[in-house]
Amino acid sequence: MKRSNYLSWDEYFMAIALISAERSKDPNSQVGACIVDDDNKIVSMGYNGAPIGYDDDKDMIWEREGRFLDTKYAYVCHSELNAILNSKIPVRGCKLYVTLFPCNECAKALIQAGIKEVIYLSDKYDKTEGNIASKKMLNTCGVKYRQYEMKGKELKLEL
């Protein structure tokens, strides 16, 4: 008889997104993303961080408050955009697993790239203007989204 407590596809891909988030050097928000095709093959992954070539030790600003140019928001690439840009093949028709519901800027990129479904872990910015705009665009453009259902399963990695 086969083992019964193996990971579902949703559990597996959300775990990959969570592990990807651990690569982020952002001291406040660690977000990870995993793009998957219809055959449940990983197409790409990403996490929030500095653009390639922008030194995240020397050049990157991690502040959340202050003038726009003195905050991370002017410079950081979100996990969803990194996952799209990291892909070696088109992501049209794929699903995105992400640890935080996409902002309005990422929603635009996901729509343009042809992502068909978003599975997210947290929606901590629900009802903010950016979140409302994101959901409006995703709804209008036919991109499905749903919150990942926590099963209470613990996955422990020892490194």
Image (cartoon, rainbow, N blue to C red):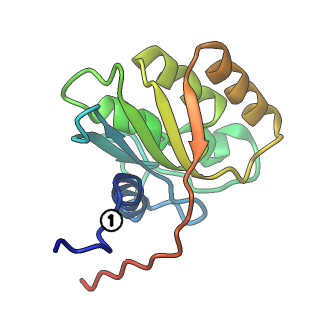
**Rendered residue at 44%/62% (across/down):** 25
User: In the image, 61: left or right of 90?
Assistant: right
* Residue furthest out toward the bottom: 158
**Rendered residue at 42%/18% (across/down):** 114
Quadrant containing the C terminus is: bottom left
Is disc 1 surrounded by few (<14), some (14 to 19) or many (20+) residues within 10 Å?
few
| Quadrant in the rendering for residue 23 | bottom left
| Quadrant in the rendering for residue 68 | top right
Whether 149 is drawn above or below 85: the answer is below
- Residue 144, given in percent of the width and then of the height, sits at 56, 28
Circle 1: element type: loop
Q: Nearer the viewer, residue 14 or 63?
A: 14
Whether 96 is drawn above or below 150: the answer is above
User: In the image, 32: left or right of 135?
Assistant: left
User: In the image, 122: left or right of 76?
Assistant: right
- Residue 128, given in percent of the width and then of the height, sits at 82, 39
Q: Nearer the viewer, residue 24 or 89?
A: 89
- Residue 15, given in percent of the width and then of the height, sits at 38, 62
Residue holding disc 1 = 7
**Rendered residue at 60%/27% (across/down):** 105
Whether 14 is drawn above or below 45: the answer is below
Quadrant containing the N terminus is: bottom left
Q: How many marks?
A: 1
Q: As shown in the figure, which amino acid type bears the numbered disc 1?
A: Leu
